[in-house]
Image (cartoon, rainbow, N blue to C red):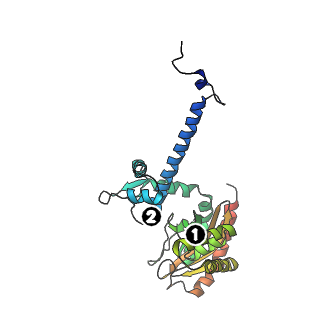
Amino acid sequence: MANEQGPESSETPAPGGAPAEDTAAGRTAGASTVQIVDHALLVLKTIAEADRPRGVRELSRDLEISKSSTQRILASLERVGLAVMDENSRKYVIGPAALTLAWRHAANSDLVSAASEATARIAAATGETACVSAVVDGRRVTVYEVESSQPLRLITGVGRPYSLFSGATGRVLLSMLPEAHLEHLVREHVSATGAAGAAEITARVAAARDQGYAFSRGEWIMGGCGVAVPIATQGTVTAALSIYGPEARLADRRMTELVPTLRAAAAQIAIRWRQPA
């Protein structure tokens, strides 16, 4: 009498005890699950970095994810508070639950812990906004910031990404990267934006490396000035310390005077950052 479950060969265990067919199916399901997670994280990252609400269709097109998958991902993100849909435009922005993630990162970050005291002192001593920034996915991101107490002040916003190719902080961070990584980022930037040639950008970064600091004036916001110095590179994290303020208070002479103060604070942060928890 034939076995209703089929040939015995189909039940032959694969290494590890699972049937051969189940093992192959498991690999396929696992790959599919990883892809779904990758797509969800990509959608989340894209709406978090966007400077405007993003719709399902444009996200699907830009990220090359099917419209149905994009819609399901956004619905899931909305359910857990990581995305919010505007009822009028039907487009999405980052949700309030992301604040919890950012807060937990800041609370557990070795860099933030090492930098908080010195950054607060710099802000108090200079009267300007002081911040610590790092390279994140090819962009500069403020990981800690102490705002100026002045009525007229500049702020960058913790977690907000900016181009590495605009401003003193970007140049200092670029100057700390390995040569191959720097060349790759410069090529990408020139190709994507049609900006100044790679040689000109590389020369400005080299100047920041040689000087050990960089100034900016009106590069990322009109009337805004900044001075930045390197902190250190720890593992895969490269960090810089900066102050920002209006040009009425941060003339070149004033920024030059502040460089030693910033360097001393950056050295203190680097020492604390390298200490084991």
Q: Residue at x 50, y 77 (%)?
A: 220
Q: In which quarter of the image is the N terminus?
A: top right
Residue receiving disc 1: 188
Q: Which residue is drawn at 55% across and 35% down?
A: 25
Could one spot residue 35 in this view of the protein?
A: yes
Image coordinates of residue 68 in percent, x first then y, are 40, 49
Q: Which amino acid does label 1 sit on?
A: Glu
- Is 200 situated above or below 104? below
Residue receiving disc 2: 50
Q: What residue type is labelled 2?
A: Ala
Image coordinates of residue 161 in percent, x first then y, are 51, 66
Q: Is residue 232 toward the left or the right of residue 27 in the image?
A: right
Provide the secondary structure element on which disc 2 rests: loop
Provide the secondary structure element on which disc 1 rests: helix
Q: Quadrant of the C terminus?
A: bottom right
Q: Which residue lies furthest to the left in this view?
A: 88
Give the mark toward the camera: 2 or 1.
1
Q: Quadrant of residue 87?
A: bottom left
Q: Residues within 10 Å of mark 1 (few under 14, many from 20)?
A: some
Image mark for residue 137:
none
Could one spot residue 178 in this view of the protein?
A: no
Q: Are marks 2 and 1 in contact (CB under 8 Å)?
A: no
Foreground residue among 149 and 70: 70
CA–CA distance in space, label 2 to label 1: 19 Å
Image coordinates of residue 16 in percent, x first then y, are 65, 30
Q: Is residue 272 toward the left or the right of residue 193 in the image?
A: right
Mark 2 or mark 1, earlier in chain: 2
Q: Residue furthest front?
A: 1
Question: How many dots with numbers?
Answer: 2
Q: Residue at x 56, y 70 (%)?
A: 131
Q: In which quarter of the image is residue 233?
A: bottom right
